[in-house]
Image: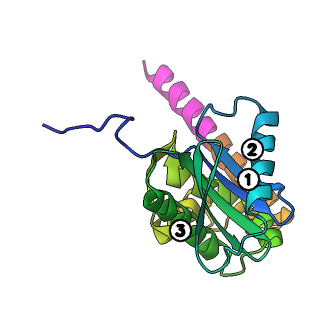
């Protein structure tokens, strides 16, 4: 018989933040109701950025406390990565989540971790967030697995992600999907007509 751990026993993540060098959002995901409004979330992000901006977290992750939360963070180029947990969470688990997110973003951006590249690949970064944590529960911390799942989720039939397609390629793909849908519908109608004609 399988034993399931309750939410109180499992480590939980309150949010994952990716901010730029001015403290503005690049990609964020909240899993806790501690910040019920958008203005509360923005105020928290500003507080986190203000508290950590003068530190040197470029070579390895740093840890700080803010408003009864543990925040593990790391800076690369003009991007600031943050993972927040409650004050009773294990810092090593939070650091592992941060490292997994950082590694996945590094792989997705092909080692060019900077704001411009992140914005161009925002869809993949948001998919990474979905692969790492769901509802505060940690799903995956291996960066290569996270990046692989995010890339697989975003791939279309021709193997190129939306961000890598030109407008003409995107229109051609849309036209192809529409044609397939129409043909499928016509085949269904012909089949029904033939079946009704026999009986």
Q: Position of residue 180 (x, y in %)?
A: 64, 48
Q: Nearer the viewer, residue 158 or 111?
A: 111
Q: Nearer the viewer, residue 78 or 87?
A: 87
Overall secondary structure of the magenta section: helix
Q: Quadrant of residue 109?
A: bottom right
**Element type where label 1 sits in the image:** helix
* Above/below status of 50 relative to 111: above
Left or right of 2, for residue 157: right
* Above/below status of 3 relative to 57: above
Q: Residue at x 51, y 54 (%)?
A: 132
Left or right of 97, for residue 124: right
In contact (CB < 8 Å): disc 2 and disc 1: yes
**Element type where label 2 sits in the image:** helix
Looking at the image, tell me whether mark 2 or mark 3 is earlier in sequence order. Answer: 2
Q: Position of residue 8 (x, y in %)?
A: 38, 35
Q: Nearer the viewer, residue 114 or 128?
A: 114
**Element type where label 3 sits in the image:** helix
Left or right of 30, for residue 6: left
Q: Nearer the viewer, residue 164 or 89?
A: 89
Which quadrant does the N terminus fall into?
A: top left
C-alpha separation, residue under disc 2 versus residue under disc 3: 22 Å
Looking at the image, tell me whether mark 3 or mark 1 is earlier in sequence order. Answer: 1
Region rendered in magenta: 184-199
The residue that mark 3 highlights is 99
Dot 2 crowding, Cα within 10 Å, few <14, some 14–19, many 20+: some
The residue that mark 2 highlights is 44
Q: Quadrant of residue 168?
A: bottom right
The residue that mark 1 highlights is 48
Q: Position of residue 11 (x, y in %)?
A: 42, 46
């Amino acid at each position: 018989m399988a034993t399931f751990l309750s939410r109180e026993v499992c480590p939980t993540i309150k949010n994952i933040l990716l901010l730029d060098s001015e403290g503005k959002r690049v990609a964020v995901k909240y899993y806790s109701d501690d910040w019920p409004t958008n203005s509360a979330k923005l105020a928290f992000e500003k507080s986190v950025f203000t508290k950590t901006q003068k530190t040197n977290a470029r070579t390895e992750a740093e840890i700080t406390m803010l408003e009864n939360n543990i925040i593990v963070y790391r800076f690369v180029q003009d991007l600031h990565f943050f993972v927040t947990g409650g004050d009773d969470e294990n810092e090593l688990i939070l650091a592992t989540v941060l490292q997994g997110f950082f590694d996945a973003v590094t792989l997705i951006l092909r080692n060019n971790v900077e704001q411009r590249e992140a914005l161009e690949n925002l869809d993949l970064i948001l998919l990474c967030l979905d692969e790492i944590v769901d509802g505060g529960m940690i799903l995956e911390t291996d960066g290569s697995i996270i990046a692989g799942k995010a890339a697989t989720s975003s791939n279309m039939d021709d193997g190129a992600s939306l961000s890598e397609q030109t407008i003409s390629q995107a229109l051609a793909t849309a036209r192809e999907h529409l044609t397939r849908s129409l043909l499928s519908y016509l085949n269904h109608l012909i089949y029904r007509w033939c079946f009704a004609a026999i009986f």
